Amino acid sequence: MTRNRDVAELKGEPRLTVRCGSHLIEVAPQAGGRIMRFATVDTRGTQEWLTPITAASWPADAWPKGGCYPLVPFSNRVRDSHFPGPDGETVRVSAYSSMAHALHGFGQFAAWRVEKHEADCIVLQYAHDAGEHGWPWAFEVEQIIRATEQGALLSMRVKNRSNRTMPVGLGFHPYFNAQDAELNATTTWRHEGEIAIAPGDEQPAHQHERESQGYTRYLSGWDGHATLTFDQDRTLELKADGVLNHVVVHCPSGAGYLCVEPVSHVSDGFNLDAKGIPGTGVAFMPPGSEIAASLSMAADAHPDPRAADAA
């Protein structure tokens, strides 16, 4: 039986701002340590790289589809909100009654503590007690959000504070205003109802466009690089470190945005790993150990050659 959790109201205010040159980032610590806006204001005008969030508050189970939030201690879905733990027990994590499965971990539903706020950098922390929301392990997370000369640098560090091995996954969930994304991966995972089943035989697509009918693609063997193209031929280059060698590309029906989510494991990775399916990306952290990941986003790092051709 799924543990139902109460729906809290998340606060999109106050917002903290960091800047470097023409780049700015707005963050709402109380709303899941969420980036509410990432934009560049330069001689070409204002470019909103992420779909900006303007709401001042929202129910935790119905968040605005915009900005970027941290995924921890797992990304995407856990089928029916339970999985076999590494010690043989059944772990039953809580989920909102509006959701069929546990979704996107606990970080995006929590209030994060501000450890440091400087002109170009915010450091946030989230501490999770053992047993909270049905997760048996205690852990803590540090998230660093930095505006750079190139654009933005996001990093996350997770530490297992419990006395036993903890399964873990992590990543970032941005909602981009991009028209398309180009990236290289080696494996496409078959899925039903956005629950991954197994690696498939289909060759992964290289180009992913905003399409009105919508789609979700789970890819692994990703080299960590992606180039996103926006209106007016502006580009954003993503570079994720080696831990984030899976990527979710999601385009909703109606094509309101394009998600390119750098993550460390596939959807329902805990259950798939327990079945012995290889390549899930699930990590197992000994007591006291740490795992870290980072994502850089460089604005107009590689101008789209289509713009040069048009000129």
Image: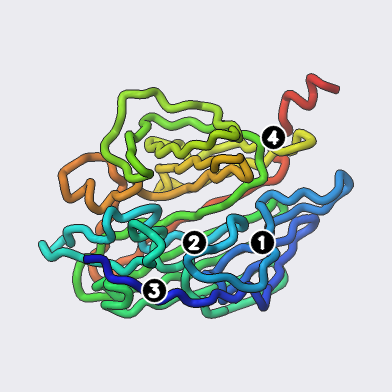
Q: Is residue 32 left or right of residue 227?
A: left
Amino acid type assigned to the residue bearing label 3 in the image: Glu
Which residue is farthest top? 309
* Dot 2: element: strand
- Bin the neighbour count of mark 3 within 10 Å (Cα to Cα): few under 14, some 14-19, many 20 and up: some
* Residue that sits furthest to the right in the current view: 43
80 above or below 8? above
Give the amino acid type for the residue marked by disc 4 in the picture.
His
Q: Which residue is mark 2?
A: 70
**Which element type, helix, strand or loop, lies under badge 1?**
loop
**Pointer 4 or 2: first along the chain:** 2
Q: Which residue is mark 4?
A: 302
Please report whichever mark, 3 or 1, sits nearer to the chain's N-terminal start: 1
* Residue 186 vertical position relative to residue 108 in the rendered view, above or below: above
Q: Position of residue 174 (x, y in %)?
A: 56, 52
Circle number at residue 140:
3
Q: Is label 4 in contact with label 2 (beta carbons under 8 Å)?
A: no
Q: Are marks 3 and 1 in contact (CB under 8 Å)?
A: no
Residue occupying image coordinates x 31% and y 47%: 281
